[in-house]
Amino acid sequence: MSTSSEIATPSGKNASTENFPVGSALIRADLRPHVHAFYRFARMGDDIADNPTLAPDEKVARLDLMEAALLDPMREDIPAASDLRRSLAATHVTPVNSTELLIAFRMDATKQRYASWDELMTYCRYSAAPVGRQLLDLHGEPAAARGPSDALCAALQVINHLQDCGVDYLEMDRVYVPQDHLSAAGADTRHLSGKAASAGLRKCLNDLLDKTEVLMVEARRLPGQLKDFRLRAESATIVRLADKMIAQLRRHDPLAERVKPSKLFFATALIEGVLWSLVAKKR
């Protein structure tokens, strides 16, 4: 039986290196360990899927072992899986969000291109939406919040893809920018290897940001749907961060520079988010 040390491929990334908060101090203290358990499981799967030294079938095999260890109450060989299993049992949350994340990681292991926006949204349904749904389930939030949560998570995923579009192509030959959008703008995949965005690629990125703005219209409904004040403040802060990142990506070229939120950027979004959350439930 393979052990965690045999299948893990740690990248060195952790919650503190993410662009958006992961189990921040805004989350209730009693739930934070459960958020972190979910994150550790997701981080392990993501690192396997992104490892450049593994063949696609080996990545899928390791992800399958993670799922087996998560679902088997007798397995203790992969701590990230067994810890999450105990967390799910303690919080009475089903493993479906966790296993759906693994679907996305298997896609990452085997799929290098996305033909259309709809195809990318299908990927986001498994790579991003389960994260928001896990938070909703942990807090016992209503099912009505899922739609806005899914929209916010998809928007965050697209923002990350656009931030890293050049790096993903050069380092992993992975392109999340839809091929039909590239073609419609008079660009192609090769444009992602440049030191600066071509006119066609810039138009393509702006078109994708326009579609992300549409997602944000639905996402901005999320804070007002939530009962838990702390989660409401967290979600409002993330909405503000997403809005700010979209504006940054319109002004800056992700091929020429790393478009990343600064500490001041985070602080401003936090203040705006907390203030918004105070009135969101009254609307």
Image (spheres, rainbow, N blue to C red):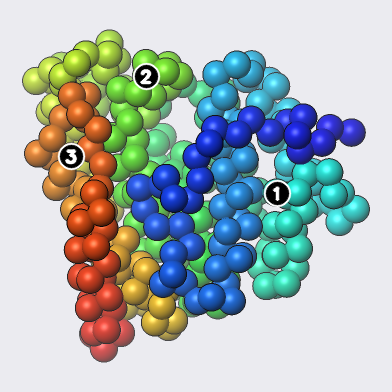
Q: Position of residue 267 (x, y in %)?
A: 24, 62
C-alpha distance separating marks 2 and 1: 29 Å
Res 102 → quadrant: top right
Q: Amino acid at mark 1?
A: Ala
Q: Position of residue 56 (x, y in %)?
A: 62, 20
Res 196 → quadrant: top left
3 or 1: tag closer to the N-terminus: 1
Within 10 Å of the Cα at label 3, are there few (<14), some (14-19), or many (20+) other Cα atoms?
some
Residue marked by disc 3: 249
**Which numbered disc covers residue 165?**
none
Residue marked by disc 2: 169
Q: Position of residue 172 (x, y in %)?
A: 45, 19
C-alpha distance separating marks 3 and 2: 18 Å
Name the quadrant of the C terminus.
Answer: bottom left
Q: Position of residue 29 (x, y in %)?
A: 53, 75
Q: Nearer the viewer, residue 31 or 198?
A: 31
Relative height, residue 12 to residue 241 (above, below) = above
Q: Are marks 3 and 1 in contact (CB under 8 Å)?
A: no
Residue marked by disc 1: 80
Relative height, residue 79 to residue 177 (above, below) = below
